[in-house]
Image: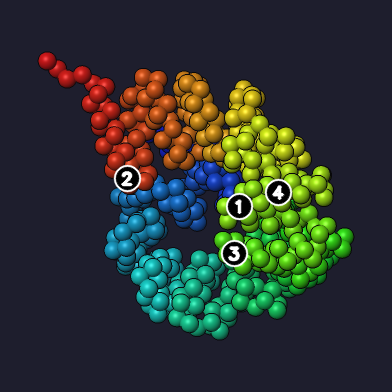
Amino acid sequence: MVCIVALIVVCLSQVSLASVADVEALLEAERIGEAMESLSTHLDAHPDDVVGHELFIDLLLTAEQFDQANRFYTDRVTRADTADNWYLLGRASMDQAEALTAFDRALSLQPEHARAWMGQASVQRSLSQYSDAAIGYAKALQFDQTLSEAWIGLWSAQLSQGSRDEAVATMSRASRSVPHVIEPWLALAEMNHEQAISILQEGITHSPDSTWLWTALAQHAFRSRGLALATSTHQRAIELAPSDKKLRINEAILEEISAGRLSWDAAHTVLDTRSSPQDPQTLIGMDQVVASAPQSTIARMVRGNLRQIQDDHAGAEADLRGALELDPTDINVSAALGLLLLNQKRASEAITHLNRAYAARPEDLGLGIASAIALAEGHDPGAGGIRLLELQTRFPHDPGPPKILAQLLMAMGQYDRAYTILLDAITTIPDTTLILFLAEAAHRTGRDIEAAAALETLTERTGDHRFSEAAQRLMTETIPTQP
């Protein structure tokens, strides 16, 4: 029998890392599975890389693998009583008192251990002890000014105390001390809108491929009403984040402004719909935009999306079809109409629109999954399954394709195929839903030991003991009692 618990432990890949910066780039691109694999390989080759271990801990905690993180770093302390190892154990601990004890032990071994001061300050900040936290972060930076996390923590503690000017000064110093870190540039831009564009442009000189910096620059350029800069920055941001729907809509708005179909004032009204889409006043504002810009495709599409959010599905469909009449080639509208129809369980009608949108944007995983669901729920489940398999190959570290494919196969009674696909996916994708589906598929195919192991893993990952109780019941049913 295969041990399911072992399968969710982060796997070692054959990918070689040039540096931890490679992992950070994967994280910014939201390629979490790849980041975990690459980081595991890196730490296997560099077991004493504290920065790498910090990232590894953060990933484990984000994936809710709390017990695994604590066990791993407790074992390191047992094997080597060093300041670094005590610091890492403190970072991996979810118990604040235990974390502080670990950081204190690190500082007793090495009083100038900057990271231990930073860890202690982080716990204090979480306890709303902002004054003590600020002192701790400052102490950490006294010993190591390259600690970007300490700079950001100090900034946050100062803001929490209402010391905005000090916070601005802190981020200014951080941008000089750690210019490759993007958070100081983003924070400075948000705290100084008048200089935001120049601040972000300077940040980009240090991190030219940062999705977050380019996206922020695009947004500020839009707000400044500079058409050329807004257009060029949106193009670059979309290259880095092709599935970002907000950027796509902004790009369409800019095209309409350039063509004279939408004014800047109307465009900003369209943008403002994002802040309160449930508010009826927002819909009234969009009614005015549509009336003032009757040839605007994007205005009708956004109003259609608003109507859908406010449960006026008939009005939403009318708006989206009206937008498509204005411009039958608009991919944004085709995607929106297809998704609306799919949500209304009208898969056969949605297929044409979603296929067209996905064909135009094959890099958009969300559209690919939606088109596959439409095929499966419409007239061709086989074609939907094939598309999901293709997506799984193209996006091997995203849980979406195997998750939907497993659901489809189990709905068709093909539990063995679902089990095989989930088993393969879980070795590279640390996703709790995949583990839950695996438990069901294993049970349905007579693999109750694997199903119980998967449920026990879910308890470890989520802290929900109902999964463990279900595993025990399953095993009681599986193992006959002796007469």
How far apart are labels 3 and 1 at the CA level? 12 Å
Q: Which secondary structure lies at badge 3?
A: helix
Q: Residues within 10 Å of mark 1 (few under 14, many from 20)?
A: few
Q: Which secondary structure lies at badge 1?
A: loop
Seen at 33% across and 42% down, the residue is: 459
How far apart are labels 2 and 3 at the CA level? 39 Å
Measuring from the top left, give residue 163's x and y in whole percent: 50, 83
Residue with the mark numbered 3: 280
Seen at 47% across and 21% down, the residue is: 413
How far apart are labels 4 and 3 at the CA level? 18 Å
How far apart are labels 4 and 2 at the CA level? 45 Å
Seen at 29% across and 32% down, the residue is: 471
Which circle's residue, 1 or 4, is located before the other in the chain? 1
Q: How many marks?
A: 4
Of badges 2 and 3, the one in the foreground is 3
Residue with the mark numbered 2: 464
Which circle's residue, 4 or 3, is located before the other in the chain? 3
Residue toward you, 179 or 370: 370
Question: Taking the image as drawn, is residue 375 in sight?
Answer: yes
Q: Residues within 10 Å of mark 3 (few under 14, many from 20)?
A: few
Which circle's residue, 1 or 2, is located before the other in the chain? 1
Residue with the mark numbered 4: 318
Seen at 45% across and 81% down, the residue is: 161
Of badges 1 and 2, the one in the foreground is 1
Q: Which secondary structure lies at badge 4?
A: helix
Residue with the mark numbered 1: 312
Measuring from the top left, give residue 265's x and y in whole percent: 76, 71
Of badges 4 and 2, the one in the foreground is 4
